[in-house]
Image (tube, grey):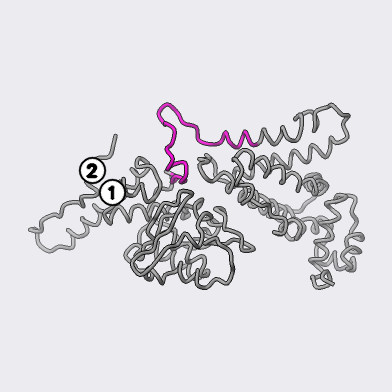
Amino acid sequence: MAAQRKSARQRLVDAAFQLFSSQGVGATTTRQVADLAEVNEVTLFRQFGSKHGLLAAVMTEAEGLVGSSDRLDLATLGQSPTDVALQRFLAQCLDTLDQLSELVRSVIGEAGQFSSEQSQAMGRGLHTIRDFMAEGLETLLAQGSGLGLPPEEVASLVMALLLGYVAIESTTSGLPDGLPQPGGLWPSRAKFIESVVDGLLSLRLQPTADSPLPDQASLSTPALNPDTWIDLPPPIVHQIMQAARKLGSQTYALVYVLFGAGVAAAEVPLLTRASALYDSSQHILLVGPHHRQVPLNQWIMGKRYGTYTKNPLTRWLKSRSDNASALFLGPDDQPITPLRVRQLWAEVTADIVSPLGAPLTLDQARATWCVELLLKGLNRQELSLLSGLPVEALNPLVQKAQARSALAQALRLDQQSGSNAAPRDQPADLEFELPD
């Protein structure tokens, strides 16, 4: 009865996924798919054009492939040491791919027969799998990883390795006992996984003679990317806030926290309802694994976004009917992942042009918060305590604040009438020499 409530297209896609995964594309006929879906074969061709069109649809629409029912328990895995958690995560990923081995082989073997449109659909399906893996890898590696590559790129590399392993293993199965599996490349599956984990952990930025081991603060809080240490001007910030508001209360609250408390993407999943402490005189967030206290500002770049007790975050919390403890949620009321935070940021800023014409990055929200606090009077040591960033890492942002202060002073001087106006001294909190 439940199957009858699905559309004919969805029944065909799910039936094809089941048959392609168990016996491969080549051995599956369109009649078999239609019979399993309880649909006329003519309907299959009307919907998909061919078996390859159906395969492309499977990669983007099959519930068993893109659904969330089989999501891995990352919270439980995250309680293990990083290397152990990664080994278990990759083992589970391989176990899932084992169930799809015939589909994997077919996708590779039939690739030359896909049309351009079908190839694009296959690519979208692979991106869906890649994004899921990126969520897992970033969750398990986020704290203190210092990866030199974005999680999406790391996930792409890992996915290529896993798909390659499954393809090789499925074509070399049945070798006599005692021979390395698969195909003599690895002694065992466990050894293959161990090698991949070793490779992942080696991506951590290694200290050099000129770069000593990081302190605890830098290990617990992801650093800003020097390439994106660019703060945003007030008009752009307020435009982003308005765009976020149109996308819903959670997105608006999330962007408000990014600009109002300088929270990094990797720290957002750690925030819970209990992390937000507020009354009429203050709004504090407990951020990061060590729960550093960070004020959530009412004022952002000269504009007030509510009060301590009534702002985008408190409105989001009061509107929720779920029982989840996470402050921000992903699909199925699971805690939001860093990847999803970046995806929401990309959605919010998609139509907003930066001063330099480049896409707006999430790091810019944090950089803007840091520069604003420096301009309001915090020194580097105080900002280091609030941000969790090492004092030395703030030097580029201090330079940005100094430049902003100088610009504001120059504009004030230009607006003054006459030539007798006495120049105002630079704020004391910005009057210090940066190290060479």
For this orientation, the residue located farthest to the left is 420
Q: How many marks?
A: 2
Quadrant assignment for the C terminus: top left
Do the residues bearing badges 1 and 2 touch, measured as CB atoms within 8 Å? Answer: yes
Residue 175, percent across and down?
87, 31
Disc assigned to residue 432? 2
Question: Crowding near pointer 1: few (<14 within 10 Å), some, many (20+)?
Answer: some
Q: Amino acid at mark 2?
A: Phe
Figure check: 361 above or below 108? below
Magenta: predominant secondary structure element?
loop
Residue 25, percent across and down?
85, 51
User: Which segment is the magenta one?
Assistant: 197-225
Residue at coordinates 76% horizontally, 53% vertically from top-left?
Answer: 115
Which residue has dot 1 on it?
379
Q: Could you say whether the residue bearing mark 1 is in a helix, strand or loop?
A: loop
Q: Amino acid at mark 1?
A: Asn
CA gap between label 1 and label 2 equals 10 Å
Question: Is any atom of residue 287 visible in this view?
Answer: yes
Residue at coordinates 74% horizontally, 39% vertically from top-left?
Answer: 164
Q: Is residue 208 magenta?
A: yes
Question: Is any atom of residue 117 visible in this view?
Answer: no
Residue at coordinates 58% horizontally, 58% vertically from top-left?
Answer: 335
**Pointer 1 or 2: first along the chain:** 1
Figure check: 368 above or below 3? above
Left or right: 269 with respect to 280?
Answer: right
Residue at coordinates 7% horizontally, 58% vertically from top-left?
Answer: 420
